[in-house]
Image (cartoon, grey):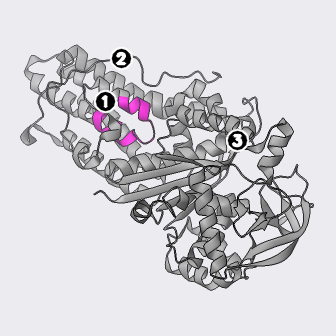
Amino acid sequence: MANSFYITTPIYYINDVPHLGHGYTEVAADFIARFKRLQGFDVTFLTGTDEHGQKIAQAAEAKGVKPKEWADEIVPRWHEAWKALDISYDDFIRTTEARHEKPVQTFVQELYDRGEIYLGSYEGLYCVGCEAFKSPDELIDGKCPLHPTREIEHVKEENYFFRLSKYAERLIDLWESDERSVMPEVRRNEVLGKVRQGLDDLSMSRISFEWGIPIPWDSKHVIYVWIDALLNYITAAGYASDEARFNRIWPVDVHLIGKDILWFHSVIWPAMLMALDVPVPKTVYAHGFLLVGGAKMSKSSLTGISPQDLTETFGSDGYRYYFLREVSFGQDGTFSWESMVARYNSDLANDYGNLASRVLNMAGRYLGGAVPRTPADDELDEADRRLIDAYDQAFTGMEAALDGLSPTEALKAAWTFVRKANSYVEEVAPWALAKDESQHRRLEVVLYNLAESLRLIALLTFPATPRASQELWRRLGIDGELDRAAFATDGVWGGLPAGSKTTKGDALFPRLDDDQK
């Protein structure tokens, strides 16, 4: 059986529809999942929606419907967004599903039975937007910096508490002994510094509203939405419902999240698991924020721009490639319409699309569209060998980048081969060879190398541009789906079958006008 690889995104609040920030996380996770499948891993890619809590109840009330009705109305919008972006998730969990709610109660009951939960009272500040308690020093002018338009609520109520404070030293030991426990390093150091100042116990129930999972031993309390939400990662994996499946895929390899929810995932979540002797996540990777700039965009905030607003112009491949390549993964990044057009035209229309068009046109013109026989080793010259070496180096670079969970660096590595293939065209000049009948076999060798380069470029770029990559394989006359390919067998130079029939087709990435909107 292939090695298991389990990757998750956050489950997203459904108080509103998906925006670019959600799409950024989702596309990055999808890139990693697709690459790991190509490496031969048995991948489980989980995403979903967070449907409990005060924020959801308020959004539903504003619409004049019950929270579950609101959830059922909004969740299809998330499915539509991920379909538009070609997200290849294996599971989509909703926290209102029985497969989630029942195991959550089982987990919390076990914490209570072990003495990890006690009854107390809480008085303090609460941000409904974050669904989190806040200390005064976290506020700016009395407002949450992430939700400055919302009023901070003063809460005083009876709560159950989780003994979070007792796990501070164990958490510090984890982070200090395992550099990959939290990534990138700046985030790990940030969490370490904060926990070294000490931890308070965590209020893990609410009594002031009803929209949540009831505490099993005290039904007037509902489980704090973040406790409920974090548990999705194990309930979807089979915790308390499918022991064999849970043992096969847990612990998770990567929780991919935004840096704004790092505390919940790197402190509260592993502490809860430690309390029940459940293995902790291998890696929590917190990427940066996605910011919007550029005067030509008609909307000015992430919540005002949906993924579909951009896929109408750039397609899902253009959208995916831009955010993976333009924004240095792990850091904050800025989006603008102008930079998206420039990146699309430079990398996709020119480097990738133009290469495909030239090679397929020459194969059709000079060889009738038929792929020639694979060159023997003694038919290769230094230019050919440099091209093959460039592929090997690009593939090695991609694997190293993915080991460090960096789609950005992986695509940089892939593009070294794309650009090398373009320069090879100029170096060997197939159009000149075609004028000399005595150079016919050399022309065949060159065009085989170029067609094989296209095949391997399609394979390398599939995690970022699945539609164009699949279409390029089809134009190369290759049967089968790329999502069933594997680097071990399909990533070896010389795999393009002789006699395959190529077709030209329209531009894979039609060039965009700078002012196209």
How crowded pointer 3 is (Cα within 10 Å; few <14, some 14-19, many 20+) is rated as: many
Reading the image, the residue beneath label 3 is 71
* Percent of width and height locating residue 125: 88, 66
How crowded pointer 2 is (Cα within 10 Å; few <14, some 14-19, many 20+) is rated as: few
**Residue 420 visible (yes or no):** no
Reading the image, the residue beneath label 1 is 473
* Percent of width and height locating residue 291: 70, 46
Residue contact at pointers 2 and 1, CB within 8 angstroms: no
Determine if the magenta segment contains residue 156. no
Q: Which of pointers 2 and 1 indicates the residue nearer the eye? A: 1
Image point (79%, 41%), residue name: 66
Specify whether 145 is left or right of 95.
right
Q: Which comes before the other along the chain, label 1 or label 3?
A: 3
- Mark-to-mark CA distance, 1 and 3: 40 Å
Q: Quadrant of residue 141?
A: bottom right
* Percent of width and height locating residue 19: 68, 39
Q: Is the magenta stretch mostly helix, strand or loop?
A: helix
Q: Which amino acid does label 1 sit on?
A: Trp
Magenta stretch, residue numbers: 454-470
